Amino acid sequence: MRVLTNIAIIAAEEVEHTEILAGDGGWWADTAGIMLLLPLLAFLLILAFGKRMKNNGGEIAVAALAINLVWASVLFVMNMTEGVLDQTTFEIGRIGSDLVFELGWVVDGLSIMMYFLVSLVGLLVFIYALGYMKGDVRVDWFFAAFSLFAGAMIVLVGAPNLVQLIIGWEGVGLASYLLIGFYWEDLDNVRAGNMAFLTNKVADVGLILGAILVAVAIGSFDFGDLAKAAVEHSEALGGVALAGGLLLFFGAMGKSAQFPLHIWLPEAMAGPTPVSALMHAATMVTAGIYLMARVFPLFQNLAEEARPLMIGIGAVTLFGIGLLALVANDIKKVLAFSTVSQLGYMMTAIAAGGYTAGVFHLFTHAFFKALLFLGAGSVIHAVHSNNMSDMGGLRKKMPITYWTFVVGSLALAGIIPFAGFWSKDEILATLGSEGYTAVMWIAIAGAFVTAFYMMRAVSLTFHGTYKGDGHPHESPRVMTWPLVGLAIPSILFGLLNIPGVSWPVIGNFTEWLGVRVVAMGDHHAEAIDYSLAAAGLGAAVLGIALGWIIFGRDKETQADRDRFEIPVLYPLLRNKYYIDDAALGLVALTKGPLANFINWTNTYILDGFVNMVGGGVKGAGEFVYDAIDQRGVDGIFNGLSAVADSAGGVVRKWQSGRVQQYAAAFVGGALILVVLLVFVL
Amino acid sequence: MLLTQFLVLGAALFAMGIYGLLVRRNIVLILLSVELMLNAVNINFIAFEAVLVSSEAIGHIFAIFVITVAAAEVGIGLAIVLMIFRNRKSANVDDLNLMRW
Amino acid sequence: MEWFDTWGLTIIVFLPLVGALLLGFISKENEDALKTTGLVTSVLAFVASLVLIGQFNFSGSTYNQYQFEVSETWIGAINANYHVGIDGISLPLLVLSTFVMVLAVIYSWNHWEEPKNPKAFLIFMMILATGMNGTFVALDLVLFFIFFEIVLLPMYFMIGIWGDKSPRKVPGFSKVFETRLYASIKFFLFTLFGSAFMLLGFLALYFESGKSDFGRTFDIPQLTELGAAGAFTGTFAFLVFGAMFLGFAVKVPMWPFHTWLPDAHTAAPTVGSVLLAAILLKLGSYGFIRILLPILPDEAITWAPFIAILAVIGIIYGALACLAQTDMKRLIAFSSVGHMGFVMLGIATMTDVGINAAIIGMVAHGLITGLLFFLAGSMSHRYHTREMARLGGNIKLMPVMGGIFAFTAMASLGLPGLAGFWGEFMSLVGAYNPLAGLSLGVFRTSMVLGAIGTVLTAGYMLWMLQKVNLGEPNEEWEGHEFQDVDRFELAAWVPMIVLIVVIGFFPKIIFNSTTDTVTSLVDMAFNPETTASAAALIGKG
């Protein structure tokens, strides 16, 4: 084990020539690797023993994350108070002298935040799943795969280098595939899983090639070395920075569902709701944002030209995909489109240089979006349908679910003082001060759309009259407590980063992350920009009001009101801008005509050639055999033997077997010889 | 000259042997005829040796050699004849045509 | 253990042959004795190869320094010697070969394909083992050639006797052939066709080496020294490279010489497919690393872009062809074309990264595709069909089998954290940064196309899983009881699974052996300075 210099130290000491005061985390940081291993161990244990346990192995999964949360909390608190920087790595392979592969774990502000987030949200979702999944099929497999995800996610966020990041990255992708296709008896779910895996795989081409470009340039996969090279404006890195940066961004687009690679995320809702909550809302989909944060120095110092494209894609995502939530009927799809839209906010922020803003939104969003999904899951659990047209009027029947869902919605909409307000405000401030005013207005418009569709979701689900079957009732406590557990941070955690406010002892979120970005020129607001905050808040309030006017009041005709069939726009939104169709068409083209053509060439051209040669040689062989061998060469021999045969027919009569005939012939022969000898010679 | 008489004797014996060999049907008599021919040859060897007198006594040696071979030949020949007679109850050469093609 | 240092390799190579002899003396009816003999022999060979690892000196070996070397005069008249030895490159492959052989014997325990006859089958397997092990240790071209060709015979018989008996329409022929006959003959002739050219190449080297101080020689280390010194150049070397390239490329197989592979795999009995995929294909790529690169380094550089292009075509082409298959085994066979494409792309870069990638890719492909063929064999054994359209819901009917199948498919698509990842990833690293002087345009395009190939690979693997493993089982199988994985299958597969994971997370167990050797190989073959110092060797000056 060795302790490496970290990004922050490099940044501060070598560039700013200042010293950063941060602890090394002591024993807790040295043993933080246990967080990577425990969920993976739980995965194996559940596979082995899950079936025989009372909760089908859910206990093991919860226990693993609970222990993880202990480590994460201790480190989180240590980081709040004194700052922690540590890195532990093991060499797993070495090629020659310069290419080294390592596994290990980083303990710094960013990764501690993610450890904490994954462990806390993960633990609550796991507990919730104990109730939600009770009596479902293959519960042991559910918890096993879910633990695999938690492990892979922590491997990802703890990665000290790009290789481990890729390992964790694909690990969470695998878990995502497994859990989206959890109900694999229905092939539609399997196809959704395939779509998620393949879309991510397409993006991974970018991630892998980007990692190669960057790593070959600086001679190391290590994030620390990368940051160092970026800070020093290294020539070698500079040459590939734009290409490498864009490739890495392309990778992030897949996992973080940026337009147009977002198509898999709504489909991913085929998985059980806890999966959607933890993976496809709170943590896994933020991996792309996390990656952008990890390689932030690259974009900040060398690949600045990439920014407009990144911000553009982020803006399209946050607004365009947000609109799709307006027409969705499936409550989980509404939340999924909303997630995509929020990821667009984060991406825009980071691309604009708002490291803290993006990561802070990631942090708060994880809580309230997980809360919303779990609330939706609670409703789905009660009414046995995903469609909002089967819901309505659940406010009285499911009070805890209702109130926590409202909290989540307000946080998402960005109403003061809920968490989402503060983080969204920070993003707006970043966009404004970095000069992306147009994008800032799009973001404000996006806030309006967000508030509007959340109001629609709340109204259709909880207000009005119940339109489904049966008698829904509140979920058991094992499910409602996690809702409350997530509602509290959704209300409070925004306060952790009020611009210009540093709490006693713990400081603020910017500082926890900020140790490393002081030198990076990260933008973070020093004070609240009241006019901007008012604009954002106003847009949100307007959205809620409009939503209330359209969906909230009329209880009877609620369902009909869902149809604003604005001529061009409505079909466009219902068909998700036809991007899904285009992607499926591309797949069908590859799978059908193209693959068949290749197979045809293999059978009829390559193999045909081989067969032709084979057949030709065989034909030539037959010709040689028939014409030359049989009739020619053999003919000669046959002719000779026929002569011999008939000759033998004559001569054989001389062999009578009578010895005395032979003797007579012999004597006659001798006499002839004598006569010849005596008289002729 | 004395040599001529010996050669005439040898030739007469040889001719008698050939006659017996070709005409007789009994195998034993054929064998005897062969003996007769061999002895005719022996007489010739001795006669020539007596006249020419080689230093290594080649004529005598050949004569003795022929006698030895003849003895062996008769031994094997008679044994074969005996076996044939036991199996076939006959010693007639005309009955022995096994060696046809 | 001194005797082991000298005779260890000989034991590993010829022990299976002794086993084959012993098997010959055991009566056909006594199946248990036959199987035990086969198992004991292969386990002994494997244990011996483990001892080899224990005794192997991993630290700082330079290329062309072999360990456990034996050199005895064999055919004096042509200066062909019994020269064997291993280095860091051949060690992992040799161990892979003995390892997979043990598993194949275990798997065979209760999986005899018609017409059973375990005796003959085991004898063929043992002969195959000798050929494969021998190829990896041979340091004499004649010896190499003989071992290389030995493997053809048992495999030919395995496919031809125990293979698939269904009729098959072959394009270009009006007659309908039995699949096994068509496949076995195609396999044999195709490979032999390549080998003929390879032998010509060997002979050309033999005569050409007569101009040097060594005299005419088949000795690989000596030829390597000559090669590094630049003894083989010009049109001569170009043609020799081409001839040997043909021999190895058919075996690998590289596009467009691959068409024997799907047929052979589809027709072969399960164990035959496994050994074919796991070891036999490696003989070709091993030949590239052991013979072509060190002996003809200059030509290797000339040919490298061409090899890279063929490799990349193989990757894309294999993946697309997979998507069109309906037969599970044929799909897996085509996947081999793609995976070996990555191996060849690694070799074509002529860098230490690329060649290391090739070796770990070879080991990983051996384990993963071997396991896939085991699984495909076991499944078709139970369902009596390989048509994917008729399968489905396998994981419901046989949960353990389905689980292992899913795992292996994931490994095959190069999931990071499993063995298959390193070969692909490092090939791409190598292709980004090939040997100085090679065309960056060709190699970087190859890198991008190769990376796109990984997407297609994921596509067909997921599609296969969907068809075979997931969904509701076909109505056809309603009421059927399927036996899930039995203990022999488990015993054969679990070691492979463990290794796939271990190599995935700790590739050092391969790299530790290969990296120094490969680095010094690259240094020796492609570094002008070492070439200059060795130039004194050439008699002609």
Image (spheres, rainbow, N blue to C red):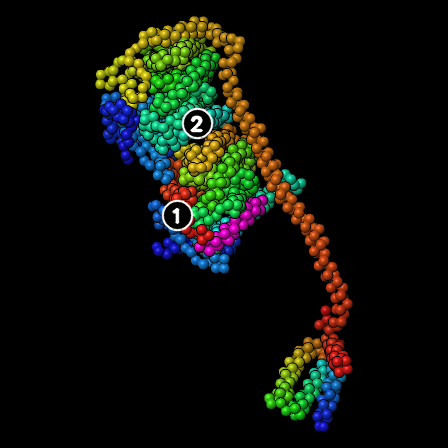
Q: Examine the rendered structure and indicate whether residue A74 appears above or below residue A502.
A: below
Using the image as rendered, state which of residue C461 and residue C288 is in the foreground: C288
Asked whether, in this view, residue C148 is left or right of residue A293, the answer is right
Question: Percent x, y for residue A225?
Answer: 33, 30
From the viewer's side, name the closer residue of C71 and A389. C71
Q: Is residue C198 magenta?
A: yes
Give SS at disc 1.
helix
* Marking on residue C533: 1
- Mark 2 or mark 1: which is in front? 1
Q: Which residue: 38% across, 51% down? A: C67
Q: Is residue A467 magenta?
A: no
Packing grade of label 2 (10 A; few <14, some 14-19, many >=20) is many
Residue C161 is situated, as x and y percent measured from the top left of the image, at: 57, 47
Q: Is residue A187 above or below residue A673?
A: above
Mark 1: amino acid: Ser
For the record, the magenta segment spans C186-215
Q: Amino acid at mark 2?
A: Gly
Asked whether, in this view, residue A396 is left or right of residue C204, the answer is: left
Which of the numbered marks, if any, corresponds to residue A206?
2
- The residue drawn where x is 39% and y is 13% is A436
Q: Chain of mark 1?
A: C
Query: Which quarter of the figure has residue C213?
Result: bottom left
